[in-house]
Amino acid sequence: MTQYPAPREPREPRESDFSLAELRGDGARMAPHWAPAAAPATAPVSPALIHGVTVPASSARLIAATREYGV
């Protein structure tokens, strides 16, 4: 049976050919080419239609104490 040796990984980690700044620059140049998908409009759901959701008391207290949601 013929054995094919697997390529050895280098002992020291290789550095990438690109820096983070170059990667960010490439992304910024490509951004105008990527159009965001149109989000479908969703209608609000009446709380009376929500069934079967249970929230632990500690989580409910946390949300109630949050300025945007509770007090």
Image (spheres, helix red, strand yellow):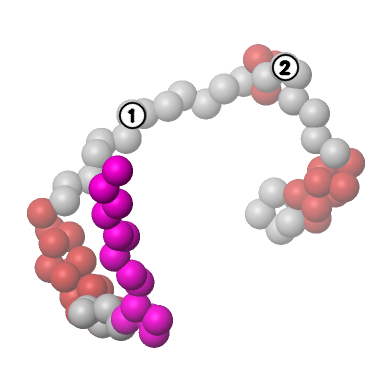
User: Is residue 8 toward the left or the right of residue 45 in the image?
Assistant: left
Q: Position of residue 52 (x, y in %)?
A: 75, 19
Quadrant into which the N terminus falls: top left
Kindly state the secondary structure of the residue where label 1 is placed: loop
Vertical order, 61 against 21 (above or below):
above
Is any atom of residue 64 visible in this view? no
- Crowding around mark 2 (Cα neighbors within 10 Å: few <14, some 14 to 19, many 20+) is few
Foreground residue, 59 or 49?
Answer: 59
Which percent across, then down, holds residue 67? 71, 58
Quadrant for the C terminus, please: bottom right
- Which residue does the image show at 65% across and 15% down from the upper left? 49
Q: Which residue has dot 2 on it?
A: 51
| Residue 20 falls left or right of residue 70 | left
Using the image as rendered, state which of residue 6 and residue 35 is in the foreground: 6
- The picture quadrant where one finds residue 29 is bottom left
Secondary structure category for the residue under label 2 = loop
**N-terminal label among 1 and 2:** 1
Dominant secondary structure (helix, strand or loop) of the stretch shown in magenta: loop
User: Residue 8 placed where, x, y %?
Assistant: 33, 70
Identify which residue is drawn at 32% across, 35% down: 39
Quarter of the figure with residue 48: top right
Q: Is residue 2 magenta?
A: yes
Question: Is 40 colored magenta in this rendering?
Answer: no
Task: Report the span colored magenta.
Answer: 1-14
Task: Please state if 2 lies on the left or on the right of 69 as rendered.
Answer: left
Query: Does residue 61 appear anywhere in the picture?
Result: yes
Q: In terms of image quadrants, where is residue 10?
A: bottom left
- Residue that numbered label 1 is attached to: 40
* Amino acid beneath label 1: Pro
**At label 2, which amino acid type do we have?**
His
Query: With 49 as the anchor, is 40 left or right in this view?
Result: left
- The vertical placement of 56 against 16, above or below, is above
